[in-house]
Amino acid sequence: MSERVSERGVAMRRVIMPSVTVLLLTLAGTTLSNYWQYVFTISIGAMVSGAALIMLVGYARCITIASGAMMAIGAYASAIVVLRFGFSFPWALLVGTLFGALAGYVLAVPAVRFRSHNLAMVTLVFQAVTIILLREAKTLTGGAEGLNIPPPVLFGTVITSDLGNLLLAGVAAAAVILPITVLLYGPFGKNLRALAANEVGARAYGISPRDYLIAAFVVSSAAIAFAGALSAPRFRIIDPDSYGVLAAIFMLAYPIIGGMNSIWGGLLGGGVLRILPEVLRPLADYLELIFCALVVITVMYFPGGLVELVGKASRRLRGKGAAAGDESLPDSVEAAAAAAVATVNAGGVREAMMRAMPAARNTTTDVADAPALRIDGMSKSYGALQAVKNVSIEVATGRLHGLMGPNGAGKTTLFNMATGFTPADSGTVWSFGRDIGSVPVEQRLGLGIARTFQHVAIFPSLSCFDNTLIGLGRNGVGASMRRSLDAAHAGGSVAEERDAVMAALDAVGLKALAQQPAGSLSLGNQRRLEIARAIVSRPRIILLDEPVSGVGADEAGRLRELLLAINRELGVTMLVIEHNIGFLLSLCERLTVMSYGEIIAEGAPDEVVATQHVRSAYFGDKAAV
Amino acid sequence: MSEFVMVVIGGLAFGAIYALAAIGIVVIHKATKTVNFAHGGFVLFGAFAAYLVVVKLQWTYWAAYVIVPLLIGGIATVIELTILRPLRKADLFTVITATIFIGIGLSEIYRLSYNTEILAMPNPIPGRPFLIGDVILTREQIWVVAGAMISCLIGVLVFSHASMGRSMRAMASNVRGATLCGYSVNRVYALAWFVGGALAGLAGVFAGPSKGVSPELAVSMITAGFVAAVIGGFDSLRGALLGGLLLGLAETFAAAYVSSAMKNAVSFLLLFVVLLWRPEGLFSEGKGRDV
C-alpha cells in the first residue's frame, strides 16, 4: 500500500514540476525592479508557447510556421471581446484560447495530410493568409494600425502594476502548462513520439496519424493563442505586423534551441530567447542574426539543446564519481541482457501473462469454428506487374502457419493487404468469421490481430517499456488523453498495464532492459521487443514478417523456442513469413509456398518442400529432376 | 485586347523569374533530397550582389549576369560544405529547419549591411519601348522573358543531358548505387548546391530591377519558387518551368482584374489547390512505384 502511495507521489511530483518552476520564477520576479517584472511577464508568456511547441515540433516533429498567426488569433479574439462586449479578462483569455483551438483545427485538417516541407509550407500559407485577413478586416481589427488594449480587469479590479501583471501571468501560465505536461509525459506524448519515429509501426498499434497530429495542432495552437491573449495587454497596442512570418519563425527556434525532447526544452528555450533581447540591448540590431546562428549551431553541435547542456553541466558538477557510474552503465546493461536471454523461461509465459491480462478478447462477433484468418481470392497489381494473383489461404485457429517463397513472390504484399496497409485490388480477408477488409489498420489490434515487420518497426527513442506499452492498445486520441491523466497520478489501470508490460518483456527475456531506449538494443533484441509488443495485448493472431531475418543462427533458434512457447502457452495463432527454410520447417505445422504471386504448394512442411514445384522455384528446374 | 496582351507579357516576365528560382529549388531537391528554404535568401543575395556590381561599382549589367551566379553558387556551395555536410546523417526535419534559419540569416545580413527598406536598381536595357498597335512592350520585359527563359532552358538541358546532370540524377534515384558507380556524394551534392545557387543568383539579377532589393524579396521568392515547384510536381524541372510561368500569369491576372490584395493570395491559393487535389503536380512526369 505504501509503495502505491509513494509511486503516486513520484508521478505527481514529476508532472507538477514544470508548473511549480514557473511559479517559483514568478515569485523570484516579484523581488526585481519594475522593468524586470515586465520582462519576466513577457518571458513567461513565451514559456507557454515554448511548451506548446514541444508538443507539435519536438514530439510530433511538425515544422510549423503558423505560430505567429495563432498568437495573433488569441490576442485579437480576446481583445475584441473585451473592447466590444466588455468581457472580463479571464473570459477573454478563454475566448482567445478557444479561437486558437478552432484555428488549429482548421489548419490541421488539410495540413496533416502532408509531412516535412509541404507541411511547413501549408502552415506558412495559413500564417500569411491570417495576417492578410487581420489587415483587411479593418472594422474589427483596426487594420494595419492595430488595436489599443486596455489593462486586464480581474474580479472588478484593473491590474496596471507590473507586479500585478507578473503574478497574473505566472499563475495563468502555470495553470496552462500543467495539462500540457500531463499530456506530454503520459501515453499521449509517447504515442506522438512513436508516430514521429515510425508511422507504419504506430498505425499497426492503433495510433492514427491523422487524429494525433490534429490533436497536437489543436492543443498547441490553443496554448499559443492563450499566450497571445495573456501578453496582449502588456504590449498595449497590437498590430498584424508584430505577429508576422518572422515572429513565427523565431518561435520555431524556442523548442530547437531549448531542446526538443522534453517540456523543459520549451520552457527554457522560450524563457531564455525572450529575455535575450533585453540582456543584449546594445546588440539589438544583430539579434535576429544571432538567433539564426544559435539555431544553426544548435542543430549542428547540440541537437539536445540547452536542456542537454544544462544536464551535462550539472552532472559534471556532481563530481567524477557520478560520471564514472554513467560510463560503466552500458557494460552492466549488456551483462543483464545476456543473463536475461539465457533465462528465457517459456514455461512462465502463460502464468505471468494470464495474471497480468486476465480479460480475454471480446469474442462476441465470432463465428463458431471459423478460422483465425482466411484470405480469399486476393490480387494486387502494380502497373503491369501482378504482385499477387488470386491467392487464398486459410490459417486454422491455434496453428503455426508458415508462408515462404523466393524474393518477389508477393509474400509481403499479401501480408500488407491482409493487415490493411495496402488496399487489395480484389479479394476479402476474414478473421474468426468476420470480414475485416474494411476495418481501418488502426482498429485491427482491437480485433485481436497484431503484426511484426520485416524491417523492425520499433520506436527507437522510447524505452522498451514504453514500446511494449503501446502494444497494449487503447491508443485512440481520447483514450490516450484519459490514460495520460491516469498516469499523472499513477491511478486508473496504470498498475495493471505496468504488470502486463513487464510480464510480456519478461516472456521475451527483456525485463532487465525495460528502461533502456529501444534504439540501443541489438537487432535480435529489437525483434524480441517487437514480439513483446505484439503479444502484450494478448491478441488471438499474430502475423510475423520475417521474424529472424538478419539475426544469427543461435538467436534464430532461441526466437523459434519463444514463438513455440507463445503459441503453446497462450494459444496464439501465427502466420509467419520467412526465407529461412530450416526455421520454418522446425516451427510450423503447415506451410504455404508462393512464387510469382501465386500459391504453388500447401500442406505439411516436410511434404511441401519435397514437391517438385517448390524445388524448382527455389533451386531451378535442374535441381528438381 | 491590348491590355490583355500586356498583362500576359508582364506575367511571363515575373513567371520566368519564378521559374528560375523554382528550377534551382528542384535541382537541389532532386540531387540531395533537401528542400532548400534558404533559396529566397539566395535570390535576395543575387539581387543585392547585382546592385553592388551595377550601382556601386558602376560596371556594366553584363558583368552582373556573369559574376553574380558564380558568386551565389559559391556561397551556396560554402553553406553546403560547412553546415549541411555535417548534417548529412541528420533527419529531414533538422535539415529543413537549418535551411529556414540560414535563409533568415542571409536576409538579416543584407538588412544589416544596408540599413534601408528597399534599394532601387536601374533598368538593365533602357530605351524606347516597342509599340505594336496599342500594345506597349518595354525592352526590359522582353529581355527578362527571353533571358530568364533561356537560362531556365540551359539549366534544364544541363541537368538532363550533361554528365554533371547524369551524376546528380543518379544520386537522386539511389545514393548507394551512385556511390558504387564511382560518383562521390560530396562532389555531387556540392555541385547541385552550386548549380541551384547560381540559378537563384541569376533569378536575383533578373528580379532586382523589377521588384527592388529588400528582405521582402526573399520571402516572396521562396514562396513563389516553392509554389512553382509544387505545381510542377516538385521533382520535374520542366514542371517547375511551366509552374513558374503559370504562377506569374495567375498573379498578374489577379492583380489586373481582381484586386492587388488578391495578388498575394493567389500563390497560396494555387499551392493549396495543387497540394490537395493533385499532390503529384499538374505536369507530373509520371512516376512508378516508390518502394
Image: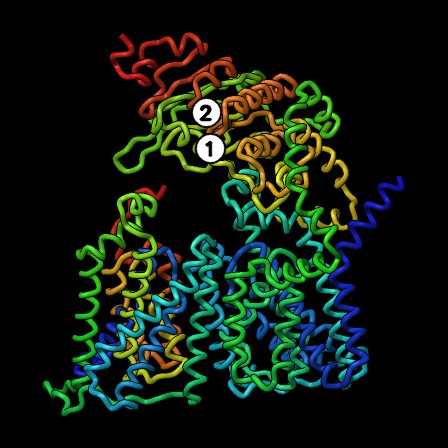
Q: Where residue B176 sits in the image (x, y, percent)? A: 34, 44
Looking at this view, name the residue that lies furthest to the right: A2
Residue placed most toward the observer, A395 or A431: A395
Q: Where residue A564 sits in the image (x, y, percent)? A: 58, 18
Count the labels in the image: 2
Disc 1 and disc 2 in contact, CB within 8 angstroms: yes
The secondary element bearing badge 2 is classed as: strand
Point out which mark residue A454 bears.
Answer: 1
Q: Residue at x 30, y 85 (%)?
A: B51
Identify the mark nearer the N-term, 1 or 2. Answer: 1
Q: Quadrant of the C terminus of chain B?
A: top left
Image-quadrant location for residue B268: bottom left
Q: Where residue A565 sits in the image (x, y, percent)? A: 62, 19
**Residue A7 shown left or right of residue A92 in the figure:** right
Q: Quadrant of the N terminus of chain B?
A: bottom left
**Residue A37 shown left or right of residue A81 in the figure:** right
Residue under label 2:
A577
Q: Where residue B205 sits in the image (x, y, percent)? A: 27, 79
The secondary element bearing badge 1 is classed as: loop
Residue placed most toward the observer, B179 or A137: B179
Q: Residue at x 79, y 44 (%)?
A: A491
Q: Chain of mark 2?
A: A
Q: Amino acid at mark 1?
A: Gln
Q: Amino acid at mark 2?
A: Ile
Image-quadrant location for residue A294: bottom right
Q: Is circle 1 on the same chain as circle 2?
A: yes
**Residue A277 shown left or right of residue A288 in the figure:** right
The answer to whether residue A459 is visible is: yes
